[in-house]
Image: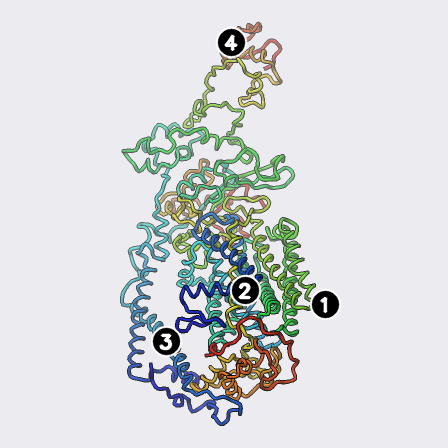
Amino acid sequence: MQLIDSTLYLGKVAVPATPRAMRKAVVREIGMMSTATRVWYALLSVGLVIGAITALLALPPGWEVMGTSPSFEWGMLIVGYVFFAIMTSGLCLASSLGTVFGIERFLPFEKRHAILALLSLTTAFGIIALELHYPIRMVFGAVLVIAPLSPMWWMGVFYGAYLVVLIVEVWTLFTPHPTIHKYACTVAACIGLCAPTTLGAVFGVLAAKPFWFGIFTPILMVSSAFVAGVALLGIAFWAVNRFKLAAWAISEATLGSVRILLAGGLIVATALIARQVLDGLTSDVPGFRPATVALVAGPLAPAFWGGRVLAGILIPLGILVAPRLRTPSFTGLAAFLALAGVFVDRSLFVVAGEIVPRTTMAGTVGYPYAAYTPSLVEIGILVGAASFMAMAYSLAERYLPMGEGDVHAFWPWPWLKRHDDHDLCTPEPAMALATVIGAAADGAAVAEEPNAPEGPNSLEAPAAEPFDAGMAAAAAAAPAPDGAAPADVAMPAGSGDLGTPTDAVGASDAPAPEALEPGPWPSERPEEAG
Amino acid sequence: MRTKIRRLWASVRPRTRRGRLVAAVAILGGAAVLAVAILAGAAMAWNPYLDFALHRDSNAKQWATLPMSFADSAVCIRCHITEASRLASNAHADIGCQSCHGALLAHVDAGENASKADVMIKVPTDEVCIRCHAAAVGRPADFQTIVPANHYVGQCLQCHDPHTTLAQHPPVVSHPLANLPPCLTCHGPDGFKARNERHPSGLLTDQECLQCHVAGRGPQQITLPGVSVPPSASSVPASGKPTSSGVTP
Amino acid sequence: MTEPLEPNTQVPAEGPSVPAVEDAPADAVLVPLEDIASQIEQASLTRRAFLGFGVALAGGAVGAAFLGQLFPVFASAEDTVSPLIPDYDPASKAWTFVVDTGKCIGCGLCVVACKEENHVPESSEFTRTWVERHTTMTDGTMYVDAPDAGINGFPAACTAPGSEGKTAKSSFFQPRLCMQCADSPCTGVCPVSATYKTADGIILVDARRCIGCGFCVVSCPYGARYITPSDEDTPASMPGVADKCTWCYHRISNGQKPACVEICPVGARRFGDANDPNDDILTVALAAGAEPLHPEYGTAPRVLYLGPTLQEA
C-alpha cells in the first residue's frame, strides 16, 4: 500500500486519491467479492456500528452506562483490555521463538504476526480509553509524572513502548529498513515478556483481592498471553490455508509447530489453573477460599467447567494430540477454542477476584456475592473491538502485500552461529535493494543473508556469502522483463508467491510443497520494492 | 561501533555551506523554541500558586478551603441559653444541637441577623426521634428504645420535650367507639398502642375494658357518646385501679 | 537538496569493501547507482531530520533546565508564603480518630452529615462513611448488614439474606470510614500519582489528575473508595474520579471536627490532635485499649476502634 502522487496503490489496485474515485473503487471491490466475503464484511460492519454507538455512549465521564459499581469496579471492559493486550504480547512471544531465537521450526508468519499484534494492541488501547473516565489525562499524567510504585504505570510504560515498537516493526516490514526491523523485533520480544508481567502485577499486588494477590498472577498472565498469541496465530494459519490467502499451503512443519506450541501452552495453563484452585481451596486467607469456591462450585462454575476447562483446554488438547486430527482445519478449531478459553479465563479471573468482597465496599454488602451484570454498553464495546480487529485484519490480508519469507532472526550471540547454519534472514526484494543501497552508500557489512531459494518453507539452505547474495538479490530485484514475479528469485525462501520455485537459484532436494494456484489476492509488486 | 558512528555521521553531515547553515538554524532555533515551551509548560503545570497546577499543595489547598455546612455545636449556647440550661442535666445533654436541627453553620455565621430561616430543621419530625429510639438489634441494652408500632402514634413532640427529655402523658384522645374493631385489635400486644404492664393480663372483652376507660374514670379518659357508667363502676376507687370484680391489677 | 552524490567518498577505509562489479555472479543484473540515488537521498533526509530533532529536543531540555535556574517559576522550599491555608502547619498535627462500637446506636446521622457536608452523591451506593451492623446469631453464624449504608438508621431485625428467622445472640454497630492508612496501598498504585498523602497524614485525591481507572478503589481492603457518578452534586464537582473520606480536611484544618464526629449524638466517633497538649484523645483511647481494625491487612490503618468489634475474630 503506497500513496504516490495522489494515487493510492493497494496491491493490484491503483486508485486516485479523490473521494469519487474512492467510492467507485469501494463499489468495485465489493462487486468483486464473493458472497461469503460480503457477508463477512457485512457482519463486521454491523459489529463496528454497534461498537461505535456504544463507544459514544461510554464517552461522557460518569455516565452510568457500565454495570460496575463501587463494590465491583473492574468489569468486562477491563477483561477486554486484558485479553487484547495479552494477545499482543503472546503474538510476539510465540513468534519470538522463531525470529529471535532462530528456532526455525517455530517460524510463524512474520508480517501477519506483526500486523495482528499491532491491531490487537490498538484495540486494547481503544477499549481502555473507553473504560477510563479521563483517558487524555493519562497521557499527560503518566508521562509527566513517574509512579514507579504503581504496576499500572509500568504497564502503561511497557505497552506504550510496545505500541511504538510495533508501529516501527510494521512500518519497516513494508519499507526498506531491514536493520531497524530486526532490532524492533527483538525489542518487541523483550517487551512482550515484560508487559504481560506488569499486567499481571496490576492484579497481583492487590492484597485487598486475595484471589488476585500473589506472585503467580504475573506468571498466569504470561502463560495466558502465550496461549492467546499462539491460538491467534493458529487461527491466522487456518484462515490463510482455508481461504487461500497466500499462494502456498502450510507445511507439516509449521502446522506441527503450532500444535506443539499450543499444546504446551495449554498444559502450562492447566497446571497454573489447577495450582490456583488448589491453593484457594486450602487457603486460610480470608476471602480467598470463598472466591475459589464461587469459581468451581458457585455461580461461576458453569462458565469455569464448561467454558474454561472443557471447551478451552480439554477439547483443544484432545484435538491437538489426536493423531487423526492433524489437519489445518482441526488445528484451527483447536486454536479458536483455546482463544475463546483464554477470554473466558480472563473474565472469570476478574469476576472471581471481586465477587467475594473482603469487606463491605463503600457501604454495600453483597450477600453472598457482589452483584455484577455486564451492561449492554460493555458488551457492545467488546463486540465492536473484536469487529474492528477482524475487519482491519481482513482488509490488511486483502490489500497489503503479505508475502512471507522475510523472517528476520536476530541472533544475539554471533559466536554461537555456525557457518553452516541456515541463516534465517531473508530480505524481500525491497530489502535486498536496500541492502545494496546500504552497501553502496555506507559500505555496510550487515547485509542480510538471504536463504538460497528453495521451497517456500524449507529453510535448510546453506548460508550464502553476504555480498554475492546481496548482488544476486539486487540483480534479482531488477524488474524482470519476462513477467515472472521477480519475487521468485529475490525472495528465496518462504515467499508467499512462488508459483514455481524450482527454477530458483540453488534449489536443493527439499520436498516441493503442494502447488496451489495463486489465489485472487494481490501478489508482490516491483513498485513496492522501490 | 566507531565505524558505525563514523558512517552514520558521514551519511548525515551537511555537505554544502547552505546545508550547514540550515542545519544550524534549525537545530539551534528549534532548541530555543523547545526550551521556552518546556519551561512555560512546566511552570504552568507545577507552579503551586496557580489554581490549575498539578502541584500537590494547590490541590490540598483546594480540599482545605471547601465551604463547611456544620458548625461547632459548642457555640450554640452563646445565644440559646435557655435550651442549653435545660439540656444540661438530662440524657440529651451531650448531643450536639445539629444532630436534630441539621447543619447550622449558616445560622451561626449570620451572627446577629440569625433567624429561624437559616435553621434547616426548626422542629424535628418524628423521623429524627425514631432514627435513634426505635428498637433494633444492636442497640445497647441501656439505651431507651420503643417499638414504634406499639407506641402512641402522634407526634413525638406532643408528649416528649427533647431538651428536657421529660415525657408527659399522651394527650387525651377523643375516641368515638362507633364502627371500631374490638379494643384489643389496636390495644392488644400486636396493636399499635399496646396496653402497658399495669393492665390486667389476658384477653379482655370490650366490656371489661370499659369498666375503667370511661369518662371520669381510670387513667385514660375515653369519651363515649351515650354510654353510661357500667354497673360495677361504683367499686372502682377514684385512683383508677380496679380492685374488685375479680380483676387483678 | 540536489547535491551531487559521491558515494565512493563516503566509504570508510576500514570495514568490508563494496563488492566489485567484476565479482558479481554471471547472471546478475546490475543496477546503476544513479537509479537508486534518490533512495539514498531519502534515507539520508529521514536520518537527518530524526537526528536533528533529537539534538534540538535535547538542547531544548538542557536550555529549559538552564532557564529554570534563571527565572524562579517554581516556589522554593524556603518560601514563607505557604501555598496551603494560613495559620495551619500540617506537619505538627497528629490527627487521631477513635470509633467506639460499644456506644454506636446505628442512627446513621454520621452518614447523613457526611453527605450534607461533603456533597457526596445521594445514592446510597456512593458513600464516604457508613455503618455496619454485625449480628451473631444463636447458631453461631455472623451476618453483616448495612441497609442503604445505614443512612436511614437500621430496621429492627437483621436484613442480611439468610438471617431471616434467626435469633440474634449479640450485635453491635461498626461505623466505617477511610483509615488514612500509614502504609496505604491506594497511594502506591495510582498510575498518575493523583492520590497522595498530606503532611498531616490525610490521603487526598487530586480530582483534576485522576483518570478514573479505579485501581485505588479495588486496592483498598476497607472498601473506603468509590468512583463518583454523574450526579451534579459530587465532591470536587467532577464525575468519574475517585473519592473517599478525607476526615473533613476542610474542617480539621480550620480547627473544627469532622462532620460525622460533630453530629454523633452518643460520642461513638471522636477526633483530636494527639500532639495538642490540651487534647488527651490518644491517651484516653489507648488507655481504653483502642486498636486499629483489621491490622492483618497490612496497611497500618490509623482509625482506632473500641468496643465489641475488638472481640470479633
Which secondary structure, mark 2? Answer: loop
Q: Is residue A317 left or right of residue A432?
A: right
Element class at badge 4: loop
User: Which residue is denoted by mark 4 in the rendering?
Assistant: B238
The part of the image, by quadrant, that contains residue A99 is bottom right
Looking at the image, residue A256 sits to the left or right of residue C240; the answer is: right
Q: Position of residue A139 (x, y in %)?
A: 42, 61
Q: Secondary structure at mark 3?
A: helix
Task: Give the chain of mark 1.
Answer: A
Task: Of the two numbered discs 2 and 1 on the same chain, state the one appearing first in sequence.
Answer: 2
Please name the residue shown 45% across and 71% down the image: A14
Q: Are marks 2 and 1 in contact (CB under 8 Å)?
A: no
| Marks 4 and 3, how far apart at CA | 112 Å
Q: Which amino acid type is shown beneath numbered disc 4?
A: Ala
Give the residue type at disc 1. Arg
Q: Nearer the viewer, residue A458 or C250?
A: A458
- In the image, residue C224 lies at what x, y percent? 48, 48
Outermost residue to the bottom: C22
Q: For residue C307, say whether it is visible.
A: yes
| Badge number at residue A284 | none
